[in-house]
Structure formats: C-alpha cells, structure tokens
C-alpha cells in the first residue's frame, strides 16, 4: 500500500512539478495575456459545459480548485465572480499563483494553499463549504488512491454541491509514440495500484525543456475505478460523456492526462468529464 502522505513518489513528482512552474509561466502554452486583460478563458469544452450546468453563472459561487498548478484557471473562475480556493502540492506553483492573483487584482477572491491533496482536510479544514469542486486536465493520474480522492471531494462539497471533473480518457494513457510515429500500445490500462515509473526529461508545454528531475510516478485509473470511487461516497451521477476524437498526431505521454495533439494545448483530444452532486 502506498503511503499517501510521503514517499519517493511524492518527492519525485513534486520535484518535477516545482521545476516546471517557471517554464510554464513563461510559455506560450500557458499564455496569460487574456487573463491579465481581464477576460481569461477556459477551454471551449469547459466554457460550454459550465454554462450548461451553471446557467445562472458563477457569481457568488464558492469553488475549490484541486491541483490548481500556478492558478491561471482558478483566476479565470474568480474573474467570473466566484470565490476560489486553489490547492497544489508545489510551493513554487502556489507562490506564483498568489503573485498572479495580486497582479490581476483578484487576491480578494482567490486564495491558494500549498498542500498534498491527501493532507488537504488538515491544511484546509472547511468541510461542506464549497458549491463546486473543480479539477481538470492532468490530475488524478498523479494520485495513487482515487477512492480517497473521491472521499476528499465529497467532504468539501456542500449538500447539493457539484464536482466538475474533466480529463483525458484513461485509454489514452496506454499509448505512446515519438515525434514522427503513430502511437502504439505500450502501457497497461489497469495496473492494480502499481505506479508507472516514467523517466523523461521532456515537458508537454515547453519544447526541449531538458528537465533535470526526470522521474515521475503515475497511476492509470480505469474509468470504472473513478466512477466506482465517486459512487461509493454516495454522490449522485448526474451527467457524463466520454468521447474519442483525434486531431493530428497524438502521443499520450506528451501532456498531462490528456492526448497531447500536435494542434496545441488540449484541442479536440480524448476526454471524459463528469458532473456530480
């Protein structure tokens, strides 16, 4: 059984994400110009779905953003009138998120907490206090225990609150391929809780990144595992779609929990999303 609070997996993953922060902040992939101009945007699929599920808008909503990285999407939600708390295990990411919030004038509506998600209930002891728990693109694949993740989500949601979860379809993680290769089956769909230990100095957002912290521990969670974990908390399944759409050449390991297509940052990739309450 994996120790959820410490261990080589946590140290290695945190070290790589710490290293990625300045690269991502400066990258075109994470362009923040629209955010700085006051009209930040999420991916089109998120914009459409949030409009469908919350037709009244996000004004006045309290949102918990799990694994928020350096806070760009958290601040987009805050620009829509929500009060947002972002959690991330990378201290440099949280420092950057706080600085960005101040820069764009949203420090009063966006707060950022540095914590391993499995320690979140101790670091942020605010049960049943969020209208929405929000987590997207490249999240649960870094977590060894998705059942505990689901319990944490449930703990934070108000009665009648909702989880918005968007991510790459887990089948995508069975594939890999080089720059000029078609993706081939290289990884198991189910690993019975055993991590894939990856050695890679490349980054999905920055070409030729040359990362020095090359080792990561990643867990493929079959869709059934995630659904079962959420159902076990007593949550009601209200909506789910799963589509497979490819555009361009794809390499599943080139971007976080998504198909990294050559067209840019998660265009029409493989994804599955769920809304729970």
Image (tube, grey):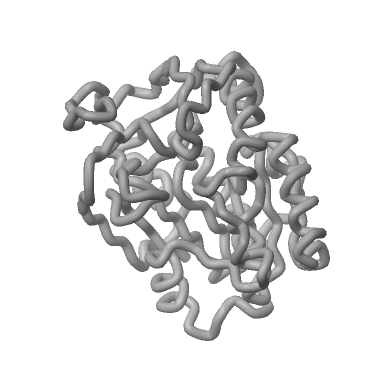
Image coordinates of residue 138 in percent, x first then y, are 46, 42
Q: Nearer the viewer, residue 246 or 89?
A: 246
Q: For the point 74% across and 61% down, which residue is it?
A: 110
Q: What residue lies at 21% left-to-right and 49% top-to-bottom?
A: 246
Q: Report whether 173 appears left or right of 103.
A: left
Location of residue 250 by image quarter: top left
Taking depth in this image into account, of 62 and 24 the one nearest to the observer is 24
Q: Position of residue 277 (x, y in %)?
A: 47, 65
In the displayed structure image, the side of residue 129 where residue 208 appears, left or right: left
Instruction: Note whether 11 is above or below 137 in the view shown.
Output: above
- Say if residue 6 shows up in the picture: yes
From the viewer's perspective, tell me whether residue 235 is left or right of residue 127.
Answer: left
Q: Residue shown at 29%/56% (left/top)?
A: 268
Q: Position of residue 131 (x, y in %)?
A: 61, 68
User: On the picture, is 65 further left or further right than 166?
Assistant: right
**Quadrant assignment, res 242:** bottom left
Placement of 158 over or under 146, stated as above or below? below
């Amino acid at each position: 059984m994996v120790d959820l609070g410490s261990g080589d997996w946590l140290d290695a993953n945190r070290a790589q994400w710490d290293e990625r922060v300045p690269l991502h902040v400066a990258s075109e992939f994470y362009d923040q110009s629209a955010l700085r101009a006051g009209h930040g945007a999420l991916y089109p699929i998120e914009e459409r779905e949030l409009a469908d599920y919350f037709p009244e808008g996000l004004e006045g909503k309290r949102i918990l953003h799990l694994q928020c990285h350096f806070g760009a999407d958290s601040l987009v939600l805050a620009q829509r009138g929500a009060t947002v708390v972002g959690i991330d295990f990378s201290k440099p990411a949280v420092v950057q998120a706080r600085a960005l919030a101040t820069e764009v004038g949203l420090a009063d509506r966006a707060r950022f907490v540095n914590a391993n998600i499995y320690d979140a209930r101790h670091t942020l002891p605010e049960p049943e206090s969020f209208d929405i728990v929000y987590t997207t693109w490249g999240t649960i694949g870094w977590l060894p225990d998705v059942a505990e993740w689901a319990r944490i989500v449930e703990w934070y949601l108000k009665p009648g609150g909702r989880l918005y979860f968007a991510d790459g379809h887990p089948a995508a993680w069975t594939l890999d391929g080089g720059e000029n290769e078609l993706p081939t089956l290289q990884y198991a769909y189910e690993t019975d809780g055993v991590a894939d230990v990856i050695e890679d100095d490349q980054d999905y957002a920055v070409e030729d990144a040359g990362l020095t912290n090359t080792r990561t521990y990643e867990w493929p969670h079959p869709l059934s595992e995630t659904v079962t974990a959420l159902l076990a908390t007593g949550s009601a399944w209200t909506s789910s779609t799963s589509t497979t759409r490819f555009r361009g050449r794809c390499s599943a390991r080139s971007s976080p929990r998504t198909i990294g297509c050559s067209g840019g940052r998660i265009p029409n990739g493989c994804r599955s999303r769920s809304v729970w309450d």
